[in-house]
Image: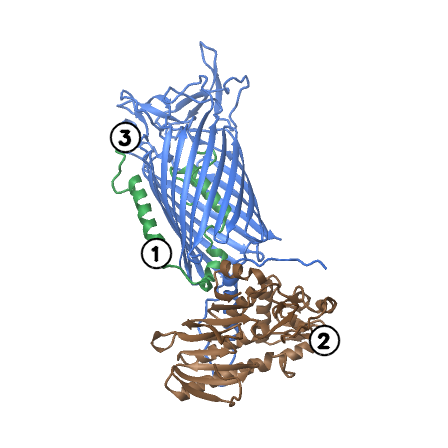
Amino acid sequence: MCPDDDLAPEALTAVPEGFRYCFQAMASPCEVRVDTSDPDLARDLGRRAEAEVRRIEAKFSRYREDSQLSAINRSAGASITVDSETAALLNYAQHCFQLSGGRFDITSGVLRRLWRFDGSDNLPTKAEVRRLLPFIGWRRVSWDGSVLELPKGMELDLGGIGKEYAVDRAILAITGVSDCPSLVNLGGDLRVTGPRRGGERWRVAIESVDRARLTDGLLALAHGALTTSGDARRFLLKNGRRYSHILDPRTGWPVVDPPRSVTVAAPTCLEAGLLSTLAMLQGRHAERFLRTEGISAWWVR
Amino acid sequence: MRNTRIRGRVSGRTLTALALLLSTLTLPACGALGVKPWDHDLLAQRAMQLNTHPHITACHEHIYFSKEGSSGGRTFDGGGCGCN
Amino acid sequence: MQLKRRKMSRGVAPALGLLTANLLLATAALADPLGPAAPPPVANANINDDTETDLGLTRVDSAVLFYHEANGRVQTTEPMISVAFNSEDGDVLSVKLTSDTLTGATPNGAAPWKQAQTFTTPAQAPGSTAVVTSASGGSSLVTLPGTGTVVRQYTTPAHQLPTDTGFRDQRYAVDAGYSMQWSPESRVSIGGSVSTERDYRSGSINAGYSRDLFEKNTTVSVGLNLEFDQSRPYFGTPTPLTVMSGDAKGGNKSKTVQNIVIGVTQVMNRIWLANLNYSAGQSDGYQTDPYRIISVVDPVTGGPTQYLYESRPSSRFRQSLYMGNKIALGPTFADVSVRAYHDSWGINSITAEINERIPLLSWIYLEPQARYYSQTAATFFHDYLVSGQPLPTYASSDSRLGKFSATTLGLKLGIKTGSTSEFYMLAENYKQSGKSTNPNAIGDLASENLFSGVNATSLVVGFTFAFR
């Protein structure tokens, strides 16, 4: 992992397995590892990946005033025709909403106004949460596949899939021009193009939920993606009870009793991210969900 | 009187032996076959179910049970009707 | 505010995989800001995309079968309807009702002859004073001289296969079953059925267990079935191998069937699912057809001297080995299966079937079907018996127990009318072929067509839909 402080805008360093290209985006340290002996190729692939990540961030970040997503959130109920990429993402989010029985909901972002997971004991009151609920719920959004109407007071937040989508698009940007083995890692959500030269696997460390330990373990990855949902840094603690940062959009409150961390392996980063989120949203039934679905996963309770 | 053992056709003993052999070969091999959970995408299609149209299957089983000498295989043997 | 706690459908992971593949494929065409990027090969966005499951839904499936045999033989109309209640956890309660109306002529077992033949059956059910008449003419009531007994007689013209125009029959059947997810890896089911028609009653119960192994790539299953049948022929049960006559006959007869099926379903690879079943069954009791006769012919001319009621063994042990496959080949789906069968009556058979589902548009598909079947004769099958030779213990001329092969060719059409509903239609032709003339047959029988197999056309029309 690249050190997340004092980063040069573009940093290409040589590492034992090739080159590592670091940059900062989506409020996370990002790296692209390329298994090659050619630094120019590594820099080119790193740049392509970075360009794709920044493009997606500029378009879909709710923190950027000039992003398309912010424009949608300011629309106050007007009809907006969105472009094909946004349409595809909204369709995807809608399907995930249906598949998850309403647990995955991109209109749940407004809850961040109440819930700040800074390790303090500042819980919102029941009344405050109840007042926000009328502004949450994908069912209230009018979406027909090309035209969107977002009721006033509601917001879309693609934070649940944005980073994973960026990883998958970055990988496609790389594989579109080169078959050099590469790994794209955006703040812990990562995916590889395939095994390294010589067929070896990439070595990945899973961040630990326990502050006393640096990592929870090492994984060796040859195909696909890996994401981790965990509360290592984001939680609230009150009366000895730990409130996870996974909010259930149906209630507005944190999910009860989720695992401390779930790491999922899947062919794409989007699937891995969604499955790890869905697992956490199952709360105390997370393990059963992962087992019955036959998902490759590791968890810490 | 015709001989019960008709050469070149499958006899009862052969059938049982074949079934046992196939099961001992396939069950351990089953661990080596198969796909990762995420590769179940095509298999999740409705069209890939073994019995996509239960009524059509039932009609066939009924017709063939009443017009032929064999029955069963896919499901149970009996016909439940007086047609044979 | 009351919240609905909806459980997630099982099978989220594969559905998610398909959705993600489609998303990445759809957005792959976007230009790379630094240069053109070729769309990478991702999973097939299959034209048949339909991974909806029935979890939490109630499914209704209704269909009608129209079956018609050539040459005035059997015709039947069989409507059926089933309802399945699927819980969110994967438990299923299902009920099916079937009705079957049968008319037409059935071969009575006698061999055709160059002269007209007359057959005699009782005119009344045993113990009844009412007179039963045939539904479609062709037979008459005759009073026998001397005894004054009234019998029913019918005549078959020369060179024609003797058939009894039969009685219009009506059958009703109910099937019910309950299947439950016993544990995340195993499933248990129980069921039963009842069927009743004028001359036959049947009841059965079954139980099954299945278990998933190796990350759901393998499923092993075992099923048991017990059936009890009662034969109640209109005119009573004749004593086997006695002369066909209008005399009063015996009472009802019964049989039992016990059956076990052991199966394994295996995901072979991403596009191929295979299923292997071994089945064994034992039938004990009355298995003769009480209406069928067999001709006893003159050893020189081949002419009929008398007609005897047929006789079949009271024990039958069947075994079969079946292998079915579903293979996704590009945009089409293939269904290929083979079955080998053997029973203790000496019948061996081989069946091979292939269907190929070809989507035309995302909501309509065609599925051509073909089936080939071939069986050997039962040990006690005879086209006819010869007068003067000792009577065998068992004898039947039912062509369904003889040596023949059959071919089915059909075409199925499916129209998807909604996310969980479909209109379907299947038209097919079923033709049995066996040795039509036997030059080694006695006398003038060598020029008669002794094979009485069927040539039938059938049409199934159905509609299925589901709701919450």
Quote the CA–CA distance across marks 1 and 2.
Answer: 60 Å
Verify CB contact (< 8 Å) between mark 1 and mark 2: no
- Is disc 2 on the same chain as disc 1? no
Q: Which residue is the site of mark 1?
A: B29
Q: Chain of mark 1?
A: B
Residue C11 lies, in percent from the top left, at 52, 59
Quote the CA–CA distance across marks 2 and 3.
Answer: 93 Å
Q: Chain of mark 3?
A: C
Task: Point out the frontmost of discs 2 and 3.
Answer: 2
Q: C308 above or below C177? A: above
Residue A76: mark in rendering = 2
Residue C370 lies, in percent from the top left, at 40, 49
Hue of chain A? brown
Residue C270 lies, in percent from the top left, at 42, 61
Query: Secondary structure under badge 3?
Result: loop
Quote the CA–CA distance across marks 3 and 1.
Answer: 53 Å
Q: Which residue is the site of mark 3?
A: C441
Amino acid tagged 1: Ala
Asked whether B4 or C187 is in front, the reply is C187
Chain letter for the blue part: C
Asked whether B42 or A133 is in front, the reply is A133
Drawn side of residue A298 relative to residue C436, left or right? right
Drawn side of residue C100 relative to residue C341, left or right? right
Residue A109: mark in rendering = none
Chain letter for the green part: B
